[in-house]
Image (spheres, grey):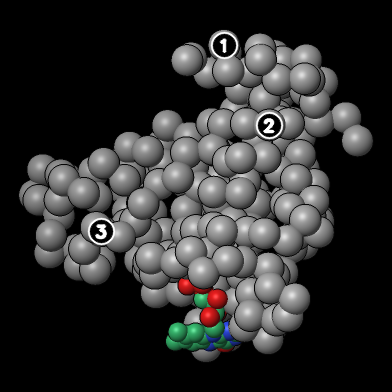
Amino acid sequence: MSLMEESSTTAHPPAKTVMRVAAISGSLRRASANTGLIRAAAEICRESIPGLHIDHVDISDLPLLNTDLEAADGAFPPAVEAFRDRVRSADCFLFASPEYNYSISGPLKNALDWASRPPNRWADRAAAILSASGGSGGNRSQYHIRQVGVALGIHFVVKPEVFTKAHQLPRKFDDDGNLIDPETKEQLRKLLLALQAFALKLQGKPAAADSAE
Ligand SMILES: Cc1cc2nc3c(=O)[nH]c(=O)nc-3n(C[C@H](O)[C@H](O)[C@H](O)COP(=O)(O)O)c2cc1C
């Protein structure tokens, strides 16, 4: 089923523009809660935000950044080229990352750095941030992602802020990292609507019918 056909089967009127969201999880764990947030975001968009299409971009096969791996003609290793292409072709971004020692996860920073190599593939696009973390909910990591984003020319949605305490009871994720908490799903839906509205504004496109809240 094409994206437009899929959109037409939902209860909401289809948005004029379908924005493609490159969604990146900062955790490589099989049962990652952050990757679970991305799966939940994709489901929310399929069900109720037809103007957003979430593409999960896996960063687990990126080598550690080493500029010696760049060829003299500017070519990158194949996994890096493929990643950079997916970043370049996205309309906007969704980062879902744990906080590691008060900061960005290593895998996410590595991915941000690879796609920043000239020509920078991140610039002039909107992004939203999510985090599932320990006691902090990931607030410090989110602010560090914003700081790095300044260097990359990424424009972040400011509100709502969604900090998810992944290990607090009652359980928000099942054993496979799937989001099972309705309240977090609702926060996620509001953030996705804010991302859609901001991304459309940044591209100079009219607001989507399904983003009116
Ligand atoms: C090396 C390491 C450092 C961590 N540091 C923090 C931290 O500073 N703040 C916090 O809230 N959680 C911290 N945590 C907990 C993780 O953020 C938490 O377990 C999160 O759910 C992991 O994400 P994932 O389920 O997507 O893999 C740390 C975990 C690891 C492995």
Residue occupying image coordinates x 77% and y 20%: 11
- Considering only vertical position in the picture, is 32 above or below 137? above
Residue 177 location in percent, x, y?
52, 64
Residue occupying image coordinates x 61% and y 40%: 43
Q: Amino acid at mark 2?
A: Glu
Residue occupying image coordinates x 73% and y 61%: 181
Q: Circle 2 sits on which residue?
A: 47
Q: Which of 72 and 169 lies nearest the eye of the viewer?
A: 169
Judge the density around disc 2: few (<14), some (14-19), many (≥20) Cα neighbours within 10 Å: some
Judge the density around disc 3: few (<14), some (14-19), many (≥20) Cα neighbours within 10 Å: some
- Considering only vertical position in the picture, is 5 above or below 23? above
Q: Is residue 31 visible?
A: yes
First in residue order: circle 2 vs circle 1: 1
Q: Circle 3 sits on which residue?
A: 62
First in residue order: circle 3 vs circle 2: 2
Contact (Cβ within 8 Å) of mark 3 with mark 2: no
Contact (Cβ within 8 Å) of mark 2 with mark 1: no
Contact (Cβ within 8 Å) of mark 1 with mark 3: no
Q: Circle 1 sits on which residue?
A: 5
